[in-house]
């Protein structure tokens, strides 16, 4: 009788629990162990960095370090830094003028000739175990019409007038590089090649600016060019798309020839085509601008042909926003990746700052978006635009990331297509202990090719005397410095608790973030004074 009276009570609570799951939705997906967590750091108009032109070098460094420290506290693992805002450079270049957003006038170098902002930024990011992706705006030549303020090194100043007319066109209040000109295409390829060759970047990133966004009363005056060399295209629109695709293809080929591990990605406008423009492939949206029809960016072609390694569409709308619903667009892009990685661009700048969309006043809008991403197996992470809004913490978004969504660290998702072979397998060779820590050291053997040399390592720690789930980020104890010397392949675990048993495993990773086989596990008991290693022989612990 007692058993019968207990069963209905249990069944009642079970029914309430299941009902609550149906009413309030499924349990939110857990954070994955590998997830892109990036932020765009914009330099145009000093949006994110530096805070204003003309700062001292020390102040520039302090500001950048501060940005990275906050992003690192949010467990971000990559930054996408705008190093070419508009025909200029936030780095030392023999062919491209210094950006006016650095020292206040285009072409004016920092006072210390040994200082290279991009070199400093790369090293600062890598010290924090964060990837650095160089973000370029390829076609935008100026941000206004004041050509007299341009550096003599800028092609709009340095070229003879007849070539300027071939290289550039005016549209609205700006000048643009002409995508149809083969010399322009080669010039832009060379700009990218120079960065890849001279800097230790993890990726090259183009944003959404290809042909200019349309403006009322403005037309593109390239009809004579099209008529003189249509290259077999019957419409000028297809011809323009091919102009852009030629650059994307050439940049991709050069990057992967020079450094095969460097990723090339695009952050396009969030709508490729509306369904009324393309009933078969278009998304269920009513966007006023589309990649394909207005910017002449055939992103799906680039994905299909393998010219880009990832796509990061700027889905800067809220869940439920009727003209361009975030949920519908995540679903659409996830079905059109052609096997490439998909990162979602989030509008951090709109949080509590979008008068035409009340959804951005919801404190959980970004949380819901990230949970939606994690529920889709074809989404590999997020990138936020831009950094400053995250630092201002509108509606507690920074708190939400630190304390909830990004509470645990995450590895950068691997790009297996860029890896010829996995890195060599590490072996833990020494375990030591102290009253406050457990120290591990490891090495690698049987390295046959240079591609097998590890770039960094991940240390996993499992509770108890068995290997647990590598997919659980709580078991990822730490990652090591990038490209560390072999005599620094060590780690000190200062969180081990006296009297506890732990299992440690080390994995190696290469530049495309592909992992090795795991090391043989080591089993450790943390004592008051040291760490006692336990051997496992024929399945028994001794």
Image: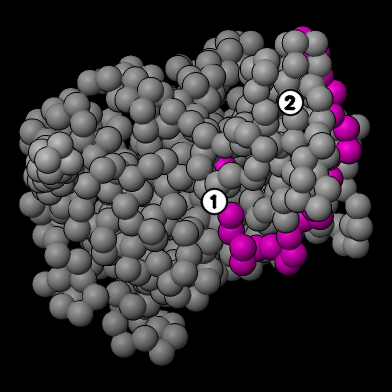
Left or right placement of residue 298 versus residue 367 in this view: right
Identify the mark at residue 293; answer none if there is no mark. Answer: none
Left or right placement of residue 276 versus residue 365 in this view: left
Secondary-structure class at tag 1: loop
The 10 Å Cα crowd at callout 2, few under 14, some 14 to 19, many 20 or more, is many
Secondary-structure class at tag 2: strand
Q: Quadrant of the C terminus?
A: top right
Residue annotated with mark 2: 525
Calculate the distance from the C-alpha at mark 2 to the C-alpha at mark 1: 32 Å
Magenta stretch: residue 432 in it?
yes
From what the image shows, is residue 217 above or below residue 407?
below
Choose between 514 and 44: the one closer to the eye.
514
From what the image shows, is residue 411 above or below residue 274?
above
- Across and down, in percent, residue 121 comes to 63, 29
Q: Residue 277, can we see it?
A: yes
Residue annotated with mark 1: 413
Which stretch is magenta? 411-435
Q: How is the image coloured?
A: one colour
Q: Residue at x 71, y 33 (%)?
A: 480
Mark 2 or 1, closer to the camera: 2
Q: Residue at x 73, y 21 (%)?
A: 526
Q: Residue at x 47, y 69 (%)?
A: 339
- Across and down, in percent, residue 396 comes to 27, 20
Upstream in sequence: badge 2 or badge 1: 1
- Across and down, in percent, residue 99 comes to 54, 32
Which residue appears farthest toward the front when viewing the image?
Answer: 1
Q: Residue at x 15, y 53 (%)?
A: 324
Image quadrant assignment for residue 264: bottom right
Choose between 191 and 177: the one closer to the eye.
191
Q: Residue 288, can we see it?
A: no
Magenta stretch: residue 384 in it?
no
Choose between 137 and 226: the one closer to the eye.
137
């Amino acid at each position: 009788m007692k058993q019968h009276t207990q069963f209905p009570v249990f069944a009642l609570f079970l029914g309430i629990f299941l009902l609550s799951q149906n009413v309030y939705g499924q349990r939110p997906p857990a954070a994955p162990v590998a997830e892109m967590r990036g932020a765009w750091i914009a330099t145009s108009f000093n949006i994110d960095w530096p805070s204003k032109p003309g700062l001292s070098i020390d102040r520039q460094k302090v500001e950048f370090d501060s940005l990275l420290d906050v992003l690192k506290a949010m467990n971000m693992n990559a930054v996408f830094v705008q190093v070419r805002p508009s025909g200029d450079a936030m780095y030392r270049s023999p062919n491209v003028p210094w950006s006016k957003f650095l020292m206040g006038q285009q072409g004016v170098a920092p006072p210390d000739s040994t200082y290279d902002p991009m070199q400093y930024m790369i090293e600062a990011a890598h010290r924090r175990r964060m990837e650095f992706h160089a973000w370029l705006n390829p076609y935008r030549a100026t941000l206004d019409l004041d050509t007299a303020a341009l550096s003599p090194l800028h092609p709009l100043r340095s070229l003879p007038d007849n070539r300027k007319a071939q290289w550039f066109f005016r549209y609205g209040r700006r000048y643009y590089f002409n995508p149809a000109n083969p010399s322009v295409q080669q010039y832009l390829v060379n700009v990218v090649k120079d960065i890849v060759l001279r800097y230790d970047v993890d990726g090259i990133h183009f944003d959404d600016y290809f042909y200019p966004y349309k403006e009322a009363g403005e037309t593109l005056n390239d009809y004579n060019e099209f008529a003189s060399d249509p290259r077999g295209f019957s419409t000028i629109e297809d011809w323009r798309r091919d102009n852009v695709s030629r650059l994307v293809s050439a940049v991709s080929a050069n990057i992967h020839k020079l450094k095969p591990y460097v990723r090339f990605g695009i952050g396009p406008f969030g709508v490729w085509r509306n369904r009324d423009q393309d009933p078969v492939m278009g998304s269920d949206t009513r966007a006023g601008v589309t990649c394909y029809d207005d910017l002449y960016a055939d992103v799906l072609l680039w994905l299909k042909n393998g010219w880009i390694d990832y796509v990061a569409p700027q889905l800067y709308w809220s869940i439920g926003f009727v003209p361009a619903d975030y949920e519908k667009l995540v679903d659409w892009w996830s079905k059109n990746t052609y096997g490439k990685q998909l990162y979602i661009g989030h509008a951090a700048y709109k949080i509590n700052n979008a008068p035409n969309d009340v959804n951005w006043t919801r404190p959980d809008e970004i949380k819901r978006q990230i949970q939606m991403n994690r529920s889709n197996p074809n989404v590999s992470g997020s990138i936020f635009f831009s950094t400053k809004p995250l630092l201002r913490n509108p509606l507690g978004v920074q708190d939400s990331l630190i304390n909830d969504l990004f509470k645990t660290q995450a590895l950068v998702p691997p790009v297996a297509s860029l890896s010829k072979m996995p890195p060599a397998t590490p072996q833990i060779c020494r375990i030591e202990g102290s009253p406050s820590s457990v120290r591990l050291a490891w090495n690698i053997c049987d390295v046959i090719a240079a591609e097998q040399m590890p770039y960094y390592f991940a240390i996993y720690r499992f509770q108890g005397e068995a290997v647990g789930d590598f997919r659980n980020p709580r078991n990822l104890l730490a990652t090591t410095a990038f490209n560390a010397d072999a005599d620094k392949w060590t780690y000190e675990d200062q969180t081990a608790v006296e009297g506890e048993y732990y299992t440690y495993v080390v994995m190696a990773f290469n530049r495309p973030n592909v992992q090795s086989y795991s090391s043989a596990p080591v089993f450790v008991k943390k004592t008051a004074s040291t760490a006692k290693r336990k051997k496992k022989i024929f399945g028994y612990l001794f």
